[in-house]
Image: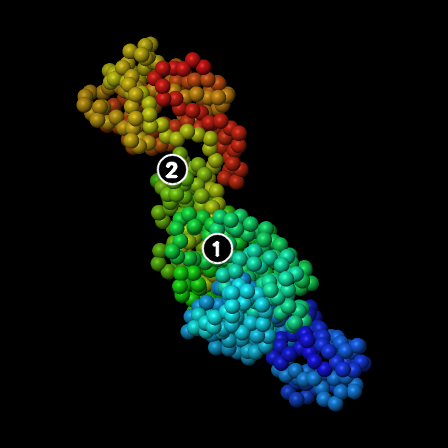
Amino acid sequence: MKIETGLFDHIVWQRNKRAVSEALITGTAESDGTIEARILKGGRPLPGWSGRVVGQSRRGKFKATITGVPIGGPYRVELRTPGSRQPLVARDVLVGDVWLLAGQSNMQGAGRIEGALPPIAPVRAFYMDDRWAVARDPIHNLWESIDEAHELICKGRPPENIQRSVGPGVAFGQKMYEISGGVPQGLICCAHGGTSMEQWDAERANEGTRSLYGATLRRLRKNGGRVAGLLWYQGESDANEKDAPLYSERMLRLIAAFRRDTAHSHLPVVMAQMGRVVDRNEDEAIWWNSIQETQRLLAQKIRDLAVVPTVDLELDDSIHISGREQARLGVRMAQAMYALRRGKKALPPPIALKRARLNLDKSTNLFQAEIEFEHVVGKLSAVGRPSGFSLVDDQRRNHVYQTHLLGKKVVLLTNLTSIDTTVRLLYHGRNCDPLCNILDSADRALPVFGPVPFGLWRVETPQVQKLEISDLQPAVRSWPKLRYPKGPQTLGFAPRAFPDTFCNIHPELTKRAPENVLAYFRCRIHCAELMPLAIWLGYDGPLKVWFDGREVFSDPDGTNPSMPNDAEISVQAAPGAHEILIALASNHGRAWGIFLRFERTDGRRKANQPPSGLAAPQVLQSLTMPQL
């Protein structure tokens, strides 16, 4: 007899739902007839296993199924046909859980060997030279691989590199052995560094072992075709403009193929979210963050999939997690897998973003971003200043200046006022090499996420920086008696462009201090259709506003400081051109100027519901009222 699949020295058989073996074994035999099995532990046959019929041999081929061997071992397995003189023997066989390890270099292992864990006998690996042995790094010994795919990718025999060979697999297996209560673990190693989703395409299985997926299928089937789950770490090779937009769909297809070919429709999958990389520019970071966000969202699209953050882990070079930190990753992946399998006393799934909202701090008139996470064990904490969050505008400026950790929540202090609540993009782990140091009590990191739209979409103009300023006018004794000027053209208006968003005329106002004087600001807008408007004003002196000659706002007590959101004035604007006239009193030299912008208020939408097809008011620069 000769074994082809399902039984080798040191193999780990995958247990079934009844927690016993259900191992399919195939091979060749010289004679036809029944196949009998004898299974021993500690030199003694297991009850009922002194010569049980487990299969048949016909026309030189045999097939056998060994069902009912308990979890554990090690077992000696003997197979024979009635006419055979000597049994076929497999030694040191275990029954437990078997896992596929796939992806690219961080799964293959590229951490320094000094970080490798000592091996333990119940955790085994099916090495790439098709032998089972106790799992010790390097378990992905590509330089001895059987399958053609690895030589084709490397354009020759892959180079030996024991010094940089530590991945998360061994730590995963050892942690699963611990938290499962001593269930043996087997790792089928299939990863290859630098490979892309295109190279992992399951449609290429028809190329046989010349493709990565075909090679993985061969290794799976050689060991009986049954596994407990899949570990995946890949994405770096797809972080580019061409491949990043395709990543989600490619992963959906790949996982569907794994579930089909393992005959396990809910095969649990734990994937690592990509970590950090250095020496990339900001344009490249867009695609790096895109893959990370896609990976995070896959957990919402694919049942029985968990995504484990790695952004906090140290590197051994510009892109590879260190050998020492790979052990932390392996533990996290084991905890996530145990949660997917609903193990006893399992931790919650990996930390996930739950909700985010803006709250106005009335003491500062600034907004705070409150971000709530789910699945946090204990509370969030950080060594040193909590870092990693950013709230970014369209100029790529970050508005977060302080981060507070409150149990399962993160509160970001920002410099945003209510006028600044237009949509910003919220990130954790923005760019390629962020400092992210927030963990829960189980040493689990927050996921990289973003861009997540945050705030309100608004249809609005920028702050007005070009308008008309009048000559200084005498102040009125009674503010309520100030009326729209009978002859605005006699006020000496002249255009003025201001260098920033605050229209500052303090030098003119102070020339006649302590006398109280008036200055008029005039602005014209055009509306393409009927629209409700908000005139947003900031001011630091007594102020009155007219819209098309009609008084719409008055504050005789206006004073410092001027904030962009001091007043929101609601008006209805018909199609066509409109005039906004603003009178500002110098307040005896204490006033400086105004902020001004316009918003179409029926365009306000939540961050995840951007408005479409709504025209914004247009600020006109002409001194002469156009005929529209």
Can you say which quadrant of the picture contains the C terminus? Answer: top left
Mark 2 or mark 1: name the one nearer the start of the chain. 2
* Label 2 – label 1 distance at C-alpha: 28 Å
Residue 208's quadrant in the figure? bottom right
Say few, some or many: other residues with alpha carbon within 10 Å of mark 2 (under 14 / 14 to 19 / 20 or more).
some
User: Which residue is depicted at the point 80% across and 77% down?
Assistant: 58
Left or right: residue 59 versus residue 95 is: right
Q: Position of residue 96 (x, y in %)?
A: 63, 73
The residue wearing badge 1 is 447
* Residue 421 visible in the shown view: yes
Q: Secondary structure at mark 1?
A: loop
The N terminus, quarter of image = bottom right
Along the line of sight, the residue nearer the viewer: 524 or 573: 524
Question: Vertical placement of 178 versus 503: above or below?
Answer: below
From the viewer's perspective, tell me whether residue 323 is left or right of residue 124: left
The type of residue carrying mark 2 is Thr
The image shows residue 515 at horizontal and vertical percentages of 20, 20
Q: Nearer the viewer, residue 599 or 516?
A: 599
Please give the label number shown on residue 191.
Answer: none
Where does residue 9 sit, x and y in percent of width and height? Answer: 62, 81
Q: What amino acid is labelled 1 in the image?
A: Pro
Q: Is residue 366 above or below residue 533?
A: below
Q: In the image shown, does 273 or 402 lie closer to the viewer?
A: 273
Categorize mark 1 by other alpha carbons within 10 Å: few (<14), some (14-19), many (20+). many
Q: Residue at x 49, y 32 (%)?
A: 604
- Residue at 36%, 15% (x, y): give it: 624
Which element type, helix, strand or loop, lies under badge 2? loop
Q: Which residue is mark 2?
A: 417
